[in-house]
Amino acid sequence: MKPVFPLTLCVLFLPLLSCETSSPGDGQTFKVTPAAPAPPEPEQTLVKTAPPSVHAEAYVVINPRTGEILLEKNGNQRRAVASTQKLLTALVLLEGGNLERTVTVSASDTYVEPTKMGISAGERYRKRDLLEAMIVRSSNDIAKCLARNESGSEAAFVQQMNAKARQLGMNNSRFVNPHGLTAAGQYSTAHDIATLATHAYNNSTIRRFSGTREIVFSFPDGRQKVIYNTNKVLRMTPYCQGMKTGYTVPAGRCLVSVGQKGIQRVICVVLGSQVPDIWEDSRALLHWALDVEEI
């Protein structure tokens, strides 16, 4: 008895093979042709809108996870960056550790303008509290106090800043003080500050402090002062996670901002801008890079 299976087998595997067979008893020949392969899926392309018009003299927008530059203007131009360099000051201070250590204010720490917390000679504070106030309010007297206490002198601390900058790959930067006030021979670039911001944001303490909208600062005599984050973009969009402002007349308005939507994160550095452009431009760049629909 002959097994009856060739036709059945061909039918079961129509998509896989082509075969000819004869059905027993009727002399008919069947030809099975496989179905044509499905056409390839069309490639999906992400269409990003045109970037916003930005009034700043220099800016860079990067993906901090890959280092990809999404947008830039004069990214390697050497220029003053004002208090955005306090992110480097903060990194050096955090590498020194011991945030619970007591810091004593010297009279020389108070000889600085214009943004001051108003700390006084002889007062004692916890290092952590001064660091938070320096990042949130950008207080120059606190930056001087922390730097001197950390390294014994402001000059010694600046040496550490420059060594750290080289370690991070900030090869187009040189720093002369810990606060960012104008000084001969002090400069950085938008690219280097973006590199600095990438490393700074990876530090959980800086990330938390820079994203804080307001804190209560306590003086040793019991006085308290509510201080607000100088980064207004924190209050302009929920996608801003923080970072650091800066301003001097030569530097103009400067802002480092970090934006996040889901798992997507971008860093935006804007240098040499003016009010209100600095806030609007930074927000617009963050929204553009994160593909946030403007309302």
Image (tube, rainbow, N blue to C red):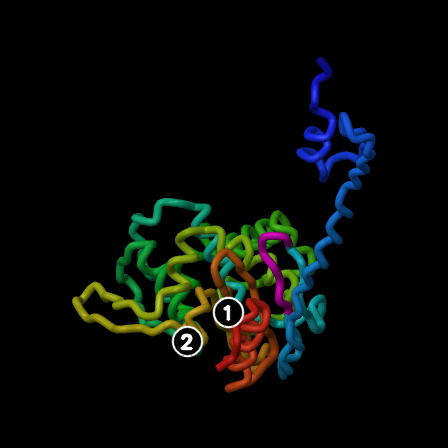
Residue at horizontal 65 percent and vertical 51 percent from the top: 169
Q: In this view of the protein, which residue sits in the foreground, 196 or 80?
A: 196
Quadrant for residue 35, please give it.
top right
Which quarter shows the N terminus? top right
Q: In this view of the protein, which residue sits in the foreground, 243 or 23?
A: 23
Residue at horizontal 62 percent and vertical 62 percent from the top: 62
Residue 234 rendering spot, x and y as whole percentages: 42, 72
Q: Are marks 2 and 1 in contact (CB under 8 Å)?
A: yes
Residue 51 rendering spot, x and y as whole percentages: 65, 76
Residue type at mark 1: give it.
Ser
Residue type at mark 2: give it.
Thr
Kindly state the secondary structure of the residue where label 2 is placed.
loop
Residue at horizontal 44 percent and vertical 64 percent from the top: 241
Q: In this view of the protein, which residue sits in the foreground, 141 or 203?
A: 203
Residue 294 rendering spot, x and y as whole percentages: 52, 79
**Residue 232 falls left or right of residue 65:** left
- Disc 2 packing (10 Å; few <14; some 14–19; many ≥20): few
Quickly name the residue at label 1.
Answer: 83
The residue stretch that appears in magenta = 60-66
- Disc 1 packing (10 Å; few <14; some 14–19; many ≥20): many
Label drawn at residue 115 = 2
Query: Going from the N terminus, do you reach mark 2 or mark 1 first?
Result: 1
Relative height, residue 8 to residue 278 (above, below): above
**Residue 78 falls left or right of residue 209:** right
Q: In this view of the protein, which residue sits in the foreground, 118 or 22?
A: 22
Relative height, residue 270 to residue 168 (above, below): below
Q: Of tags 2 and 1, which is closer to the observer?
A: 1
Q: Residue furthest top?
A: 1
- Residue 63 located within the stretch drawn in magenta: yes
Relative height, residue 12 to residue 110 (above, below): above
